Image: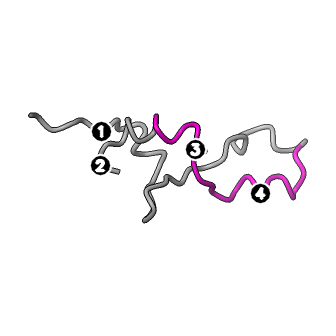
Amino acid sequence: MPKMKTNRSAAKRFVSNGSGKFKRRRQNLRHILTKKSAKRKRRLGQGTLVDDANLGAVKRLLPYG
């Protein structure tokens, strides 16, 4: 059986941790930042885990992750 291909765009966006979950960046920190509060921008700068509802899709894109 041939090797499975990793989705390269997903590989640049997600990184796996030891428990098999994936870390991701938050959205909404690219532009239009003046109307967002400092507290909100601070929180958006921190990474978070991929939700359980989307974990299967990310695992399908990253078979060796």
Q: Position of residue 15 (x, y in %)?
A: 45, 54
SS at badge 2: loop
Crowding at dot 1, Cα within 10 Å, few <14 / some 14-19 / many 20+, comes out as some
Q: Relative to the observer, which residue lies in front, 9 or 15? A: 15
Give the mark nearer the N terminus: 2 vs 4.
4
Q: Nearer the viewer, mark 2 or mark 4?
A: 2
Location of mark 4 (residue): 43
Question: According to the image, label 1 marks what residue?
Answer: 6
Magenta span has 52? yes
How far apart are labels 2 and 4 at the CA level?
30 Å
Numbered disc 1: secondary structure: loop
Whether label 3 touches label 2, CB < 8 Å: no
Q: The residue tagged with tag 3: helix, strand or loop?
A: helix
Tell me which label, 3 or 1, sits earlier in the chain.
1
Contact (Cβ within 8 Å) of mark 4 with mark 3:
no
Q: Residue at x 72, y 40 (%)?
A: 28
For mark 3, what is the residue? 52
Pick the residue in front: 1 or 62. Answer: 1
The residue under label 2 is 64
**Distance Cα–Cα, label 2 vs label 1:** 7 Å
Picture residue at 34% right of the left edge, 35% below the top: 7
Image position, residue 40 (x, y; %): 84, 52
The region drawn magenta spans 36-57
Q: Is residue 45 found left or right of 2 in the rendered image? A: right
Marks 2,1: beta carbons within 8 A: yes
Label 4, label 1: how far apart the Cα atoms are: 30 Å
Residue beneath the point at 58% across and 44% down? 52
Closer to the N terminus: mark 4 or mark 1?
1
Q: Earlier in the sequence, mark 3 or mark 2?
A: 3
User: Residue flagged by tag 1: what amino acid is it?
Assistant: Thr
Q: Amino acid at mark 2?
A: Tyr
